[in-house]
Amino acid sequence: MGIEAAQIVTKKLCTQVNIVLEYTLFGKVQNILISEGFTIKDVIYEQDVEIIVFVPCDDVETFIDMINEATNARAIIQKGDSCYITLDSQGKIII
């Protein structure tokens, strides 16, 4: 079993980006994130919605511009730390 069950994984250097927005904008932003292939780490539902996304380091500024354009700059966007994430062969995050 052991080694036969192994699979190839990919390590990717990403920046964690937190997006805080109103519920009315959540569906639109979530759809953009999924269609563009970004890795969503978590979604926190409180007074507003917070989406935590892993964005490849080279794409962070373009990503922020895209979210600002989609929300008419009504989202609060904070860049966090950079870290390596591990993805399986289907592109899903392995924690």
Image (spheres, rainbow, N blue to C red):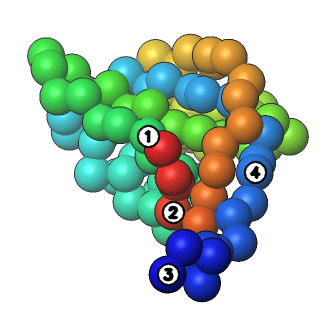
Residue shown at 86% from the left, 40% from the top: 58
Secondary-structure class at tag 2: loop
Distance between the Cα atoms at labels 1 and 4?
A: 15 Å
**Mark 4 or 3 closer to N-term?**
3
Amino acid at circle 2: Lys
Determine crowd level at label 1: few under 14, some 14-19, many 20+ residues with C-alpha closer than 10 A: some
Q: Please give the residue where the numbered disc 1 appears in the rendered image.
A: 41
Q: Please give the residue where the numbered disc 3 appears in the rendered image.
A: 1
Does residue 83 appear left or right of residue 53 in this picture?
right
Residue shown at 17% from the left, 28% from the top: 45
Q: In this view, does 27 lie above or below 43?
A: below
Distance between the Cα atoms at labels 2 and 3?
A: 22 Å
Closest to the observer, 66 or 78? 78
Callouts 2 and 4 close, C-beta under 8 Å: no
Of circles 2 and 3, the one toward us is 3
**Mark 2 or 4 closer to N-term?**
4
Q: Does residue 89 appear anywhere in the picture?
A: no
Q: Is residue 10 above or below residue 64?
A: below
Amino acid at circle 4: Lys
**Mark 1 or 2 closer to N-term?**
1
Does residue 38 appear left or right of residue 85 in this picture?
left
**Mark 2 or 3 closer to N-term?**
3
Q: Please give the residue where the numbered disc 2 appears in the rendered image.
A: 92
Closest to the observer, 92 or 49? 92
Instruction: Give coordinates of residue 59: x percent, y percent.
Output: 79, 42
| Residue 11 numbered tag | 4
Amino acid at circle 1: Lys
Callouts 1 and 2 close, C-beta under 8 Å: no
Closest to the observer, 36 or 93? 93
